[in-house]
Image (cartoon, coloured by chain):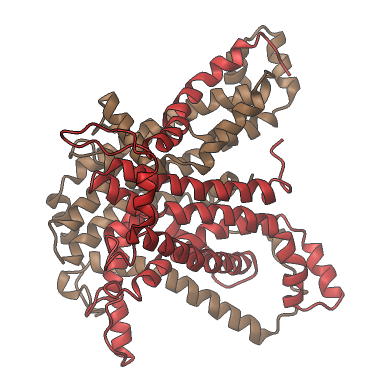
Chain colours: A brown, B red
Amino acid sequence: MSAPTASSPPPAFGASPASHALETAAAWLLGLLWILPLAYAVWTAFHPSAYSTRFDPGAPLTLQNFVNAWHAAPFARYFLNTTLLVTMVLAAQLVLGTLAAYALARFEFRGRDLVFALILLQLMVMPDVLIVENYRTMNALGLRDTIVAIGLPYFASAFGIFLLRQTFKTVPRELDDAARVEGANAIQVLFRVYVPLARPVYLAYALVSVSYHWNNFLWPLIVSNSVETRPLTVGLQVFSSTDQGVDWSIITAATLMTSAPLLVGFLLFQRQFVQSFMRAGIR
Amino acid sequence: MRRPGAVTPWLLLLPALALLAAFTHWPALATLWHSAMSTPKKARPSRFVGLDNYRAMVEDDVFWQALWNNVIFAAGTIPLSIALAIAMALWVNGRIRGRGFLRLAYFTPTVLPMIAVANIWLFFYTPQYGLLEQVTQALGLPSHNWLGDKSTVLGAMIVVAIWKEAGFFMIFYLAALQGISPSLAEAAALEGASRGQYFRRVLFPLLMPTTLFVLINALINSVRMVDHIFVMTRGGPDNASTLLLYYIYQVGFSFWDSGYAAALTVVVLIVLALVAVLQFGVLERRIHYR
């Protein structure tokens, strides 16, 4: 991955060769420290447990830890649950966010600013901290221990609405007007003009949302209570805190397995990932 | 702006607003109300108890400890992760050997699930044969149970949090740096400024809006980030690593004391409201959502 070269500081800044070398060393030391926990996990997961804490370059490689972990808990089911969860949440967020953002970006109506402020409130008061009341609500709705209940509080995302509103506001008014002249109604204009133009933002938002909900733990832990609903994160926690005692090789194998899809996705789409997080963060 | 009857925008907003009302606005208000109610028991339904839950809170040592732990956790995590994020961004934005690898290394913790990396860090800190222990043994230092000792457990958690967050914050600084014109650096160099002066007088002030944005995020995260506690310590030893949200979980879902859990949630909401005041008082003057 290379940054645009124009942005690199010019060599004019005369860092002496010695201090430049020192900084490079510091950057590398930090980089190695940052990758160390992951490297350690990879070592342990791919070697027999006898070598889990002995770093012998001649140690035999094995996939047995992954096989054991896979069979020690219903990970296939957990993968399915998480996939269903993130797909459902993303679909709902995109649809609801698109409609709401369109209303806020291109319509004028009484109370619009108040509505926008009420929506932005969710940026501060996330569902993550309202666990006690939301659990009460799910109980009352009879939804406890369902995948829908895990996703429901996140369906309307202030962040998504905000991001799409900003994007829709940059769409040239002329395109909108042209479509209207051809007789398109509000919804048709939205899907013919605005949505296609916002495609990169949708991608950016999707990456952020999927990685957030793939990793989410506390709320799923509270509302899910069975193998049929538990997402991977909760499944991993149940697995590593009960059965395995101290067999670190199997636990780290399970850990890597859980993170693998995101990690592989990240390695393949590094640039998009970094740019998505960037785009999503700049307000 | 279009006005095809005032109904269309409301219809478009309805689904999102209904869900937000049900799972953000209503629960935030209901928390206030329920914090003044007793927890229903088998024979006794919930009843109004006024400030009783808050009185219990004032006398609850664990609450004060969780609050204090949270303050230390935030104070330990935020400045260091921001400083590291700036350094990382400057490095990977500059001409450094192995820039691609470094960017990857710094950012990777952000994509990994906290619950998964907590397992790895648990192994890292394990007494006797964990990696940290092996390093300290090789250096001839005495053995130490980092997570089992009240005086080091919170520090150990802070390290994990910094590791998880610094790369995430780096991204925002990287974006900001790429928007700064290189001619500024050239001008500063012509004026004979040192790199340190350039950073202090030019770069750091220009990065201020980013720093404020990152600060708000970091503050919110220090309230929200508790996943690792479930794996690594369960709040122990002796509540030394209990943070507020984790304590709410314990009270609400281990002790099933919903009235008291609501009162504790009110404290978290007040903290978040203070963060919002900070944002709208300081940030909003610089950035316009228009």
Q: Is residue B227 visible?
A: yes
Residue drawn 74% across the image and 58% down it: B180
Quick one: B39 or B170, which is closer to the camera?
A: B39
Most extreme residue toward the bottom is B140
Is B141 rendered above or below residue A231? Answer: below
Residue B12 % position (x, y) = 55, 18
Residue A194 % position (x, y) = 62, 24
The answer to which quarter of the image holds residue A78 is top left
The reply, left or right, for residue A23 in relation to residue A239 is right
The reply, left or right, for residue A49 in relation to residue B125 is left
Residue drawn 48% across the image and 62% down it: B74
Residue drawn 45% across the image and 36% down it: B28
Q: Which image quarter holds the C terminus of chain A? A: top right
* Total number of numbered discs in the rendering: 0
Is B231 rendered above or below residue B24? Answer: below
The reply, left or right, for residue A11 in relation to residue A221 is right
Q: Is residue A159 visible?
A: no
Residue A120 % position (x, y) = 57, 36
Residue B142 % position (x, y) = 28, 89
Q: Which image quarter holds the N terminus of chain A? A: bottom right
Most extreme residue toward the top is A183
The reply, left or right, for residue A76 in relation to residue B48 is left
Is B107 rendered above or below residue A202? Answer: below
